[in-house]
Image (cartoon, helix red, strand yellow):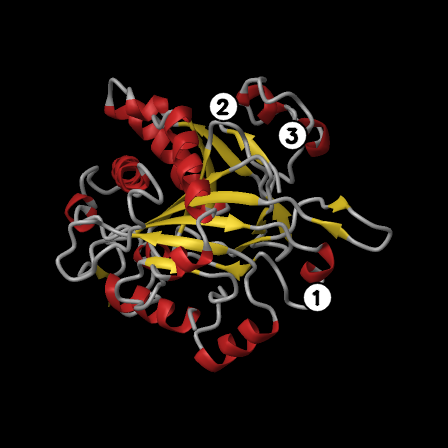
Amino acid sequence: MAFRNISNCGRWGRLGHALKRSQTRSLATLAEDVKSDAAFSIPLIDFSKFRTAASQAEKRRTADDIVRGFKEVGFIYLNKHGISDDTVQHTFKKSAEFFRLPMEAKSQLAWEDPRANRGYVQIGRERVTQSADANEIAALRAKAPDFKESMEIGRDWDATWKNRWPQEGAAPGFRETMLQFFQTCHDLHTLVMRAIAIGLDLDEMFFEDKIHEQYHNLRLLNYPPIRRQLLQQEGQARAGAHSDYGTLTLLFQDSVGGLEVQNPHTKQFQPAPPIPGTIVINAGDLLARWSNDVLRSTLHRVVAPPAKQVSATESITPARQSIAFFCNPNAGAHIACLPTCAGKEAKYAPVTTEEYIVGRLSATYS
């Protein structure tokens, strides 16, 4: 996997060289140093040009770059997105503090219902896959569970489904930090959806009344150290190959890496390395259905980064943290082929957000 800077896609070096550069280097320079298969590279997009645009024509240029990235790859790196590094690092800090709580305390917050999709998910309970067959997923989970734990957080004002918070004394500032970050991510999601609307020749505000209920999911992820030998077993991964369910996913990575994206042309998985200051954003299933597959919902997975040798026969991978904000349309939103994406015919029957996501979650968890 490589990435390209939309405004500088003509100069390339080797990926390995780029990743060894100092993190203080500019992202534009990093992008120039990365050699890419021209048919498959993740665009690096300066979103400040959209946020501060003085005209619709300026917005359109960035919107076209974003939509092109989702058409060709399904993934983009978003730079100068408006979320400060301090905000991201503080959220990572509070996430790490939560996962350090005793298992007894975390287990009291256990995930219970796919309609709620809230609470703590212990290692091995989830098995992400493209299969929708509950028995097949159960067999995969038994053979090769995803080696990660997570905490799932939704909109806090929901009258039916409540978030499951740790006691303030056990995790000071956790609830406040996550609610602020949830809102911050929703606001960015709204802006990116406006850009997508423009790029699909829709009114800029087309999605506004279809996403405003904040039917999203903030997922904190912790990948503990694990013996490399365990991750080399058949079918095993830190998170198996899958697509996401909603419109967009905003992924915040630490420096460890491990994300891989499937090249839709060759079907090979290629690394999507962390780039300081950027957010990895990918299109999800519902956006692909909405756009009649004009925009790609691309398979991706998390694999083990380089391991530290601890004996002649064994090595251990480092711990990894990430934060994913799964953006969804409103629960009752009618997902049917957009008027500008119909082509010859609609590929998918209409579905509501809740029907699709609850169905996928019901099969994914034990």
Relative to residue 19, is residue 270 depicted above or below?
below
Residue 174 % position (x, y): 33, 40
Residue 245 can be seen in this image: no
Q: Which mark's residue is nearer the viewer, 2 or 3?
A: 3
Residue 82: percent from the left, percent from the top? 34, 26
Looking at the picture, does residue 107 appear above or below residue 10? below
Circle 3 residues within 10 Å: few <14, some 14–19, many ≥20: many
Tag 2 residue: 7
- Cβ–Cβ under 8 Å for marks 1 and 2: no
State how far apart marks 1 and 2 are (Cα): 42 Å
User: Distance from label 1 to label 3 (Cα)?
Assistant: 32 Å
> Left or right of 33: which side holds 348?
left
Say which label, 1 or 3, has the lower sequence index: 3
Query: Which of labels 1 and 3 is toward the front?
Result: 1
Which mark is first along the chain, 2 or 1?
2
Question: How far apart are the alpha carbons under marks 2 and 3?
Answer: 14 Å
Residue position for label 3: 34
Amino acid on which disc 3 is placed: Val
Q: Residue at x 39, y 56 (%)?
A: 105
Can you identify the residue that label 1 sits on?
Answer: 233
Give the amino acid type for the residue marked by disc 1 in the picture. Answer: Gln
Q: Amino acid at mark 2?
A: Ser
Q: How many marks?
A: 3
Identify the image quadrant of residue 80. Answer: top left
Residue 132 in percent (x, y) is at 43, 74
Residue 240 vs residue 47, the one in the foreground? 240
